[in-house]
Amino acid sequence: MMHRYPCHDPSCPRTFRSVHGQTNHYRTFHINRNLRSQSQLAAGLDPADELQSEAQDNATFVPYSPSASPPPPSPLPLRASKTLHPGLNAIPCDENGQPVDPNLPPPPRTTPNNNDWAPYADEVQFKTADFLFRRVEMSAPNIDYLLELWALSLSTHDDTAPFASYEDLYRSIDATRLGDAPWKCFTTSYDGEVGPNDPSWKSAEYEVWYRDPDVVISNMLDNPDFNGQFDYAPYIRRDKNGQRTWSDFMLGNYAWKHADAIIEENEENRGAMYCPIILGSDKTTVSVATGHVEYHPLYLSIGGISNTVRRAHRNAVVPIGFLAIPKSDRKYDNDVALRKFKRQLYHASLSTILSTLRPGMTTPVVRRCPDGHFRRVIYDLAAYIADYPEQVLLAGTVQNWCPKDTSLPDNLDGPGGRRSQRLTEHLMNTWSSQDLWNNYGIDDDVIPFTFDFPRADIHEMLSPDILHQLIKGTFKDHLVEWVGRYLVLEHGEARAKEILDDIDRRIAAVPAFPQLRRFPHGRRFKQWTGDDSKALMKVYIAAIAGHVPEQMVQCISAFMDACYIARRDDLSEASIKQLEAAIRRFHESREIFRTTGVRPEGFSLPRQHALSHYPDHIRQFGAPNGLCSSITESRHITAVKKPWRRSNRYKALGQMLLTNQRLDKLAAARADFVARGMLAPDHAAAPLPFVADTIEGGTGDADAAAIDDEYVTGNVVLARTREPAKNYPRALSDLAAAIVQPRLPELMRRFLFDQLNDDETLSSNTVPLDACPVISSEISVYHSATATFYAPSDDSGIRGMRRERIRSTPSWRGQGPRRDCAFVVKDDQQPGMKGMSVVRVQLFFSFKHDGVTYPCALVEWFKTVGRGPDAETSLWKVKPDVVRGEREVSILHLDTFLRGAHLLPVYGSRFLPIDFHFSFSLDAFESFYVNRFADHHSHEICY
């Protein structure tokens, strides 16, 4: 008997009981064989759309202005569209800048043949150097010892180790010419008069180490590893509904507007490639114990690189400088002269480091690009990643003023116009220093470095900073702190501590979930990191509900909605409207903190105010997660902290710079060897099409991981193991007795009936059991399944793919059973939770019938409470589906699974027992919240 729904691909033998299973299989294993880039996935673009074929598209672009009326709606296109900038459209040229036929292949990047490993002798030498220096960061003495053992093991064969010593290995790395960008140094000092009794900072010399940014950018553009993940021109993308979408930098208004300006400045620039330069800087401490060793690195990236690649680094964010940090005695901490000198030194250093880029900002320079073609490139300072204190320093504004607008510091969300370099210059020529400071928040002791570069405006360049403005700032430092203050004001300090202890127990009691940080003792630890704050956001709302007023919960929920929307990898006009609505709800509901006496002074806080600029930031720069300071903070680890630990700590900076230089050379050499086909790429190749009787998935202990698979939509498969889970009977009746589920044989027979039935009028629930097929095969039990799905807003591979594990095991890390929950699709035509249900997996297993393997799950069902999300928390509520006093159970094919689901108990106002363990949470409560804040993908689907 045939299945009801065969696969749409005539070459595929699979058939399905449900339309969802048929659609999910086809989208996952057939449509995406023509692999697409991330930006194409988000827009639904045809992968055959090429750069040159779109260069002649003529669509009118209207720069965004909050005060301007929106343009009249344009007719909806019949398909997704991509419109390149008509002027700076990146026409290929030769090495001399003369146009060439874009249909011709690019000239070869290297002359060596495919067996030339120079400066390494062979593949073994390169892989040894890469492994020892980059991957395991082995010390020089240990390298020598390992090479000695290696040579000893080969001596009987008259052979030697790949290198004679660590010096020999280092010399080979240093001889690599690819990726070479030498470090240089200039010194500077105070240029005023210095008296004999003046502080030491006035007579000191300050070293600034830097690399030529033009050389660094040339190396980045010439990196074949970026091919396929690089935009060569500003463009506008619309989805199939005609809505404009934003993700990578080149989709923003900033790139388009500046490309217009470059053409207006000189028509001869037409046909060049726009290269926006992204900078970032932030002080970081390397000595954890004392905290006295700090550095101030300066990073560079370029806007053509996709956000996913920039977040994954892959040499897309490069240190180009270490800025000087003048220090003096404590008595000079508030010295006006020292503060002025620090600011002026900072801007002078930036201007000097970037000076080699200035000629290329007006006259194109010829550079080779990731696809191998040469192009005429125009540089442009585009964005600067920094936290609020550094933004104040960069913009030359006064503390507590906004560096983006002119609103007053006591009412930052009140009226105010945009700051601009032109406005600042006009005000400086009009008003006194005191008036500038008091009335406009301008420090005229500082002339921003952007005054030295064409088209650059630091107020326009400052990018959003989700990590410091929203996660660490508004959430942790403001909202969480304010909840604590409210409890003290409302209940007194003693009772407030009891409630806070219960909130901590609630946080510790949440069920396990992939990559969910556990807080076994609540929030009571001294040093918070950004990851700690992100983890707390995921579970905080359910923990405080019942202990604080409903409006307070609504406030935090609205803020988190705004934060999660802003963090999305791809945003549309509808997404921005949702963001603006969430910000309005947040501003309205946060008044509860004023009326309860927590914030009688109001909410004029720079980091919280920054959220108001996010809709415009998205339109200007694309998705904020591509320009967040979390990128530079992560880069601190590889560029500063680890190189410092590898140094001998004496004059460590020189050793750190050399380490960075060697790492860059190894990365460049690897990219070259990959481009020549001598090495496999770091990311995995496209996976093979699904084979019906193959059970795949990981076996490790990790619950989630970013992967570089190229699937468009996700799927769930049983874990791959050498053999099924042990200690389970293989016979169906024995297995039913072992798991205390006497209905298992009946459920499986009815499940198989539905799988094989092609009569739409029949259902297994309406036929006698005798009419259902008998299962005679052995049963294989598994303790987990892996879900693979497209989640670019979360930690994912460069193609936006993510893999997580759904577990159902009788023992998890010695802490009792773990039975995870999952989303199953019941109607893929309905949006969000209306088309999904939540189930709890009691058993993963598979069996065979007529040569076909059926991967299945025995599940318990939950049903939704109400017709929409809970008004207080904005989360859907569910409760166990009970029929005649027993949990509703059934068997589902894994085709119906979407991914894991995280449930949070509805704690109410009752206190948890002190010794309550999280492993009992899914059994101990009557109802649960469906946690759409578990990760960003959950937030996008659970509405």
Image (spheres, rainbow, N blue to C red):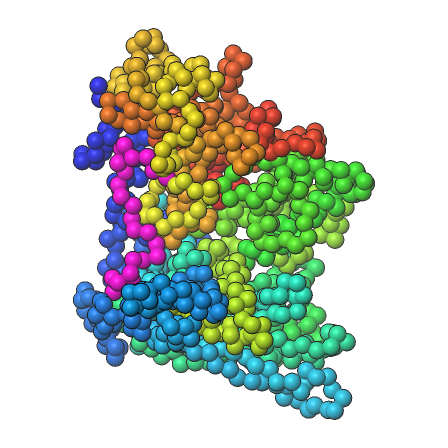
Query: Which one is nearer the viewer's eye here, 499 or 668?
Result: 668
Q: Quadrant of residue 370?
A: bottom left
Per the picture, the main secondary structure of the magenta-coloured stretch is loop
Q: Residue at x 31, y 17 (%)?
A: 775
Q: Is residue 870 visible?
A: no
Residue 737: x, y in percent?
A: 45, 16
Q: Quadrant of residue 694?
A: top left
Q: Residue at x 41, y 45 (%)?
A: 802
Q: Is residue 80 magenta?
A: no
Query: Which one is nearer the viewer's eye here, 268 or 364?
Result: 364
Residue 486: x, y in percent?
A: 74, 43
Q: In the figure, 351 relative to 395: above or below? A: below
Q: In the figure, 880 relative to 620: above or below? A: above
What quarter of the picture does the N terminus occupy? top left
Residue 577: x, y in percent?
A: 49, 47
Query: Which one is nearer the viewer's eye here, 380 or 581?
Result: 380
Q: Is residue 606 visible?
A: yes
Query: Which one is nearer the viewer's eye here, 30 or 849?
Result: 849
Q: In the figure, 225 relative to 650: above or below? A: above
- The segment highlighted magenta reads 668-697
Residue 481: x, y in percent?
A: 70, 48
Q: Residue at x 66, y 54 (%)?
A: 527
Horizontal arrangement in the rendering, residue 141 relative to residue 601 (left or right): left
Horizontal arrangement in the rendering, residue 374 relative to residue 824 (left or right): left
Q: Is residue 695 magenta?
A: yes
